[in-house]
Amino acid sequence: MSRQDILRRIRTALAVSLHDNAARHAAVRTRLTSPPRVPSPSAPAHEPHIVNAFSSRLVANGAFVATLRHCAEIPAQVAAYLTAEGLPLTLHLAARLADTAAWQRSGLSCREGPVRADDIASLSLAVAGVAETGTLVLSSANGAPSLAAFLPETHIVVVEQRTIY
């Protein structure tokens, strides 16, 4: 089957003629100048059922979930988690999430910079969370290397409730 035959069959299936280019060009111009609205999330991220659905999906996938009221609570929660898991209190910080004093008070030995092969635990800040699937959306940038999610055996992710959809 030749190229022309294939294109003719496609035009026939789409009910398009070779001679109606003006109408097709007009339709394309209209679509480009007035694109359709992109759907947005149906529920605000702060609604409890969205956050609960997200947490439930994470737990179903084997994650540990802790809900905190303030960023300042993160260091103590991370230290408690590492202790409960029998892990050393050392942490690679992919993103600074609280004041330095809170990290020092937690008893954690924190390090920023490139991820190393001997890092056992790392901490990242998620861009967003998807409640329907329990998916964490992470970005890679200076100060937030994607390797932090893969190299250490334990990856701790902070997700702000307002970014859960």
Image (spheres, grey):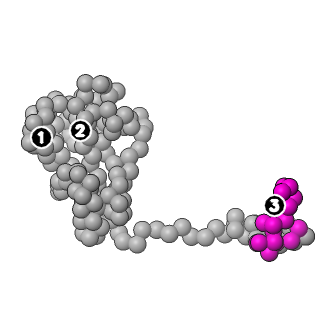
Circles 1 and 2: CB atoms closer than 8 Å: yes
Seen in the image, is 52 located left or right of residue 29? left
Q: Amino acid at mark 1?
A: Glu
What span is in magenta? 1-18
Between discs 1 and 3, the one toward the N terminus: 3
Seen in the image, is 133 located left or right of residue 3? left
Viewer-side residue, 162 vs 27: 27
Q: Residue at x 69, y 68 (%)?
A: 31
Residue 23 in view (yes/no): yes
Q: Secondary structure at mark 1?
A: loop
Q: Residue at x 85, y 61 (%)?
A: 5
Check disc 1: other Cα within 10 Å, few if <14, some if 14-19, many if 20+: few
Q: Position of residue 35 (x, y in %)?
A: 64, 67
* Relative vertical location of residue 145 with respect to residue 63 in this rendering, above or below: above
1 or 3: mark nearer the eye: 3
State the separation of the CA atoms marked 2 and 3. Answer: 53 Å
Viewer-side residue, 21 vs 77: 21
Q: Which quarter of the figure is the C terminus placed in?
A: bottom left
* Relative vertical location of residue 41 with respect to residue 129 in this rendering, above or below: below
* Relative vertical location of residue 147 with respect to residue 18 in this rendering, above or below: above
Disc number at residue 154?
2
State the separation of the CA atoms marked 1 and 2. Answer: 10 Å
Q: Main secondary structure of the magenta part?
A: helix
Q: Secondary structure at mark 2?
A: strand
From the image, tell me which residue sits under label 3: 6
Q: Position of residue 59 (x, y in %)?
A: 22, 56
From the image, tell me which residue sits under label 1: 85
Magenta-drawn stretch contains 7: yes
Quarter of image, res 143: top left
